[in-house]
Image (tube, rainbow, N blue to C red):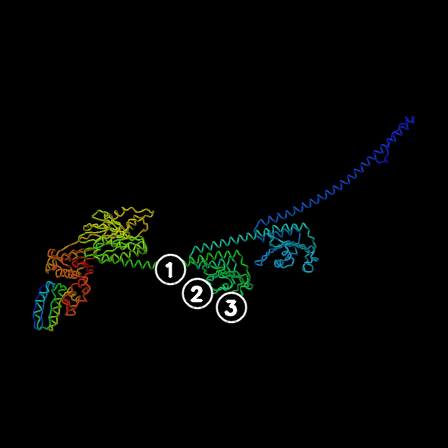
Amino acid sequence: MTPNESKAVSVELSNLSDINACLVEIKKLKKQLEDERKAAEKRERVMEQSLKESRQMSTHLQQISQALAKERKAVLEKNEKERLLWKLIERINSTFDLEHILQSTVDELGHFFKVNRCGIIIPNFKSNKDLVREFATGEWKRSHETYSMVTLSILYKSVTKSLKPLIINDTITHELTAGHLSEDLRSILMVPLVQHNNELIGVVYLHQCTNQRNWTENELSILQAAADPIATAVEKSKLFNKAKAWASREKLLNKLTSRIRGTLNINVILERTVAELGQALQASRCFINSIDHKTSRETITHEYTVTNTETLGVKKESPLVINKIGDKNADYISVLDVFKDPRLSKLNEKEIEQLHKTGARAILAVPISFQKKIFGWLCFHQCNIPRNWSIEEISFVQAVASQVGVAINQAEMVEELTEYQIKISRELKQASQLQSVLLSAGADTKKNLPIAVSYHPHHNVSGDFYWVTELAPNVIGILLGDVSGKGPAAALLTGYIIGELKGLLENQETSWNPELFLTVLSDSIFEQNQYSDFYATAWYGIFDVISGKVICCNGGHPSPYLMKGNTVTRLSDDPGVPLGLLSVKDAIGGYVKKEFELAPQDRMVIFTDGFTEQRQLDGSFVAESWFTEALAVNRKYELQDLPEEIIRRLNIVSKGAPADDDRLIVAIEMPKNNIIEFYEDKEAYLNEKLKIILDDVLKHGMPKTNEPSLKLGLVEALYNSFRHGLPKAPKNAKQCITVAWWIRESSFSCSIIDPGPGFKWQEAIKTKSKLKDVDLLAEGGRGLPLLFEIFDKVIWNAKGNELGLTLKW
Amino acid sequence: MKLSVEDKDDRLFVKIGGQLLYSETDQFKEEILPKIGQHSVVTVDCEELQFIDSAGTGAIVRLWKECRMVGADLELIKVIPEVQKLLHLTRLHQLARVVGVDD
């Protein structure tokens, strides 16, 4: 209550009688008033104090409110920045397409800062092809060509040099821009984009046109903050593109490698290689400069050029001038710009002219080599513009060049191998022919012997061999052998053995004695074996076709089969040690001689291990019993057909499996012989006896026209024996001439034996084997030449008292 | 062997049959050679000669030599093909005139 305020006091007049009472009352009232006044003053003071406090509070509150507002603003700004950054990061993560990222970023920043322009520049120092994207509003939009020129501006250079933000609030007054700008660009904010290692990767800028704008710290801070994800995006995109390029090159490298390894046609490989490498590296030209090691000449062998680039010309001799400017042993030679490279000064005028003619501005050459041997250079030309060949590109080309080197080396090896193979094949063919010639002498078809042979070498040249020889007209020597191993070496030993055995067969001491024959042959091989580890198995037998007697010996060879009537048995001939393993002195016991007789039409089958060690398709051996069964089944076949039938049978039981070894089979048959003894040479007697022989031969199909010749031949032979043999025969010998004959198919053979001492037929036939050599006026000496004239084969035993004659028709 | 010899003026005519073999050559020579005299031609009729061996050809060579000594010609006529073949084989046709049975 204020002091001027009055309070209504109620006074009762009835009580005024007492003044004192009145004064007391007044005093009381006065005091009351005083108390009231004091109370009011007190209240006033309190109120004032309260007001004061209230005022202080208000100020404080205002301060708090201001602080809160400031804080709120800061938070809002921060949120705004974060929102912007999140948005940018989101965009960046959505794609690897850098151009797309940059465009969306400038759009976002442009809208965010409400500027007339926002741009990002990512310079490409290697290709000079900068990546620039710009956002602009309305009339401030510029063409790509125009804003691409930003990199030339002093402002851009200032930022990229200092790596610090450039803040121009007013271009009119700023020292860098005053008087230089042609358009109404008033404020510029440019921030560098840097990687973690402080490497510049570009700039981001904001333009405010017409109206001047003071860039706030917050705006600068936001733009700087936005620069980080942009830099990350660029880095990520670059890494992605690098990985993509690497993957693509790896893919191409794999493709080229698999192609190179997949074919031996080197020309096709190289043609495709230059084409694909040229495309992969986007080079103007890719070619291979091949070096001829014999002449040292360089020739372009394969070339790829892009459209509108002139070709250098395949097969043109074109010395690679970079050979002069680089070290020949260099891993690569890279020229960024032929006009600026100091190494080009080493070239003479003509060479420089030649190089310029190619249009090449940048060159990359990588040697194609294998184990330090350089085949040539894999070269690239970039025409018209310089090119900085990257390490990745060079590594990639080196990887391909390495594969090409392998391929060329491989192709050369294949070529050499092919030539070698052709040569070897030719030589093997010649060796095979030679072996056939060698063996054919042992399989003389004129022999009219009851013998059939089938010979199937496993390779061109074989390790199996055989020899059939007439030791006497009625005695044949049969040798079958198998040299260990196969192929040329085995064939050479076979050739050696054939040479040796011919000598042994010519020597009666060995040829008529199978034990000695094998022993001497074995010793001969043993001597040769000191230089090799070969050995041979062999079976040698002597077969008398008149008596049926067989004398044989086995040197580690499969024992023959005997076919007697319907029975097939294995000859028990005690196979000895294979030939060539032991010397004569070491071979204790040596070889065991076996003697037995064959009855007419009995057969003996001698063979090599190609028949007993044949596998089936599943790898298991054919059971040995097959041979006995096959011989029993094939008994019905003619002797000549028997060997092939046996082989056919083997093919059946081995279920078509290819032959594991050479197959040689020899079958002999004891013929049904006819024997006549001649005791006198009287005409009638002779006619009568000869008629028996002639009738038999005619019965077996000899043409009648051959009869006089055969008769003449037999007469000549018999008269020779009567005139020269029988008169000189020992008195205790049977005084007759024996004629044994046998007929097989279209051949007649006979053996004419007299008991005389024989004669030196070897000398006689030197001068008297041809009628034309006989003196026309001579009254004798026509007998022997007539025999050679009439018969296909004329042979005596060594002694000369047994004559063998064969006539074929 | 059958052999007949006939002297007709300056011609000696011989007819031979059967076989002329080694065992018969002596007989052949003994019977014919002494009869060759002042003849200008010796004719051997071979129509019945069935067979001849190298000794027989030797005998014919001897006969030719004898003829030459007296200046006579030797001719073998009516020779059967089988024999003619041998005569040609032994080149006797170069010494004597050989006429086949079909000529």
Mark 3 near mark 2, Cβ–Cβ under 8 Å? no
Q: Quadrant of the C terminus of chain A?
A: bottom left
Q: Chain of mark 1?
A: A
Q: Relative to residue A331, is residue B20 drawn left or right?
A: left
Circle 2 Cα neighbour tier, 10 Å, few/some/many (<14 / 14–19 / ≥20): few
**What separation in Å lies between label 3 and label 1 (alpha carbons)?**
42 Å
Circle 3 Cα neighbour tier, 10 Å, few/some/many (<14 / 14–19 / ≥20): few
Mark 1 or 2, which is nearer the eye?
2
Sequence order check: which comes first, mark 1 or mark 2?
A: 2
- Residue that carries the numbered disc 1 in the rendered image: A419
Residue A585 at least partly seen: yes
Q: Amino acid at mark 2?
A: Thr
Sequence order check: which comes first, mark 3 or mark 2?
A: 2
Residue A452 at least partly seen: no
| Image point (58%, 49%), residue name | A94
Eyeballing the image, is A312 above or below A526?
below
Q: Relative to residue A767, is residue A415 drawn left or right?
A: right
Q: Secondary structure at mark 3?
A: helix
Question: Residue A691: image x %, image y %?
Answer: 13, 58
Q: Nearer the viewer, residue A465 or A422?
A: A465
